[in-house]
Amino acid sequence: QGRGRGMGRGRRMRRGQFMGWGAGFSSTVPATAIPTVDVTKCVGCGNCAKACPFGAITIKDGKAVVNAALCRGCRACISACPKGAIS
């Protein structure tokens, strides 16, 4: 009873083994997707920080700073910057 009713049913999954459509995808954001701030163009207006849905941008010393650990690469900050300081 219960055997042959589905892939992996009744088996313990070991670390690193996944089933389903998401298998094999460790991240959807490449490391290069983290935006960079050109401090010579940044005026510290805060539009990028307000636009970031993940709270990954703060204004320090009048310039935008991206926290790479929080950034998910959505690029909302790039379109929000009026000076084109984020790429």
Image (spheres, helix red, strand yellow):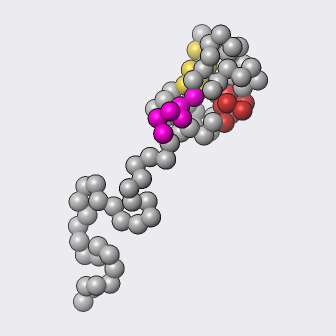
Residue located 62% across and 16% down the image = 38
Residue located 42% across and 53% down the image = 25
Q: In the rendered image, which quarter contains the N terminus?
A: bottom left
Looking at this view, name the residue that lies furthest to the right: 82
Residue located 51% across and 27% down the image = 67
**Quadrant in which residue 10 is drawn:** bottom left
Q: Is residue 27 magenta?
A: no
Q: Where residue 49 sits: x, y (%)?
A: 64, 28
Residue located 57% across and 28% down the image = 35
Q: Residue 33, relative to residue 58: is it above or below?
A: below
- Judge whether residue 50 can be spotted in this image: no
Q: Residue 59, relative to residue 32: is it above or below?
A: above
- Judge whether residue 65 can be spotted in this image: yes
Q: Where residue 58 sits: x, y (%)?
A: 59, 23
Task: State the extent of the magenta-drawn residues as a range.
Answer: 30-35
**Quadrant in which residue 43 is drawn:** top right
Relative to 71, 24 lies left or right? left
**Quadrant in which residue 78 is drawn:** top right
Q: Residue 2, relative to residue 8: is it above or below?
A: below
Q: In the rendered image, which quarter contains the C terminus?
A: top right
